[in-house]
Amino acid sequence: AVVSTQSTGGYRDDSLETVKRNQLQYSLPLKILSYQELYGWTMDAIVKEIGMKNNCTFCGVFRRQALDRGAALLKCDKIVTGHNADDIAETVIMNILRGDIARLGRCTAISTGSEGMISRCKPFKYTYEKEIVMYAHFKKLDYFTTECIYSPNAYRGNARTFIKDLEQIRPRAILDVIKSGEDMSIKDDVKMPTQMTCTRCGYISSSELCKACIMLDGLNRGKPQLSIGKANKRKQILKATADTGSTAAEMF
Amino acid sequence: SSGINAEYGEFQTFQHYFIQINLSRMDIVIELSGGAELLFDGKKRHEVSLPEEGWTLAKLLPWIRDNLLQERPELFMQGKTVRPGILVLVNDADWELVGELDYTLQRGDSVLFISTLHGG
């Protein structure tokens, strides 16, 4: 099991303690990685720089990479995440609302993977959050729940409220939203991002520099806004400044 | 009359009255988990004695909101029912199986509210 922790104290403590207990209960090897050791930045420090908006982007990107790096360290064949039906339905709605065609195409895939990357899958893709909570209750499973302290007003909250209201009216709506996401096809003339590898750290990327490297660059230069916003603007800023940025891969 | 006899007499009457009241009260247990307890000052288990009978869950919910809830009522209730995302179990069974808001509470019942709204 790989767990990443993004802060120095408080928020993740109980969660980590639960995971450590789970390790003993299920006899699993455990690897804990912290954003501090991987990237040199905790979420607390990042939020201090950028505030409470857009921090989901930083945390999410760092977490994905952390999971990949941790899985590679433990020599895993596959990464399995706990995303459930509610999560995926929320993501479909989010991507539609934000017009994110690229992510919409990928987010409903039960299994993803490409050359050189450890593939991932979401076995709970069709399992309702309600089923999972009920199962955990009746089986008396040891788990911990809390609200993320960095993003109380995250955009996902809007999608979540919507999905929950839908579920109350017609519970099948959650599966239907996922099916709609799966069935959406994109016109041929729509520009889609091409997949390549980051020129600096070798991680999978849709542009020359992967999101993590761009974000770290921005943070380390005191210009975190580099990683938020349109790509053209970013290119201009990068061209203008000397290329002495940091890389996530240096830590390995 | 006055003195001990009079007081004893009053005490007997009071006891009789007290037992009468007890019989027409309804004791139930309200439990919270999954983070819902945070709205109730962290207290997960509430033993409650409701006055008289004839309590449906529809009647209980606003009572909980007005008497037990410590903060942010909008996170517990939405309109006449629980906020979507909060599961309700009556005696360890999904409340959908017993009629949801229309279920009439019985003495000794246990109502559990589990919040599923967490994470990022």
Image (tube, helix red, strand yellow):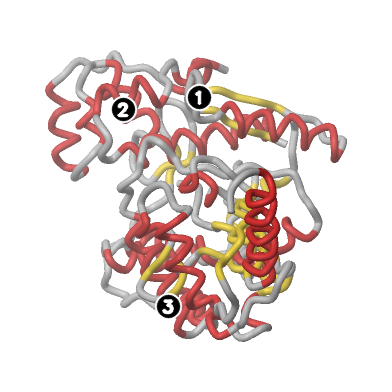
Callouts 2 and 3 on one subunit: yes
The alpha-carbon separation of the residues under discs 2 and 3 comes to 33 Å
Left or right of B80? Residue B58 is right
**Which quadrant of the structure image shows residue A58?**
top left
Q: Residue at x 63, y 65 (%)?
A: B17
Neighbour class for label 3 at 10 Å: few (<14), some, many (≥20)?
some
The alpha-carbon separation of the residues under discs 1 and 2 comes to 15 Å
Residue with the mark numbered 2:
A47
**Which quadrant of the structure image shows residue A23?**
top right
Q: Residue at x 13, y 32 (%)?
A: A236
Q: Are marks 3 and 1 in contact (CB under 8 Å)?
A: no
Residue with the mark numbered 3:
A166
Residue with the mark numbered 1:
A10
Q: Give the amino acid at mark 3.
A: Leu
Left or right of A182? Residue A220 is left
Q: Give the amino acid at mark 1.
A: Gly
Label 1 marks a residue whose chain is A
The secondary element bearing badge 1 is classed as loop
Q: Are marks 2 and 3 in contact (CB under 8 Å)?
A: no
User: Which of the two discs, 2 and 3, sits closer to the camera?
Assistant: 3
Camera-side residue of B81 and A180? B81
Q: Position of residue B41 (x, y in %)?
A: 49, 41
Q: Are marks 1 and 2 in contact (CB under 8 Å)?
A: no
Left or right of A228? Residue A181 is right
**Residue extending farthest front:** B1
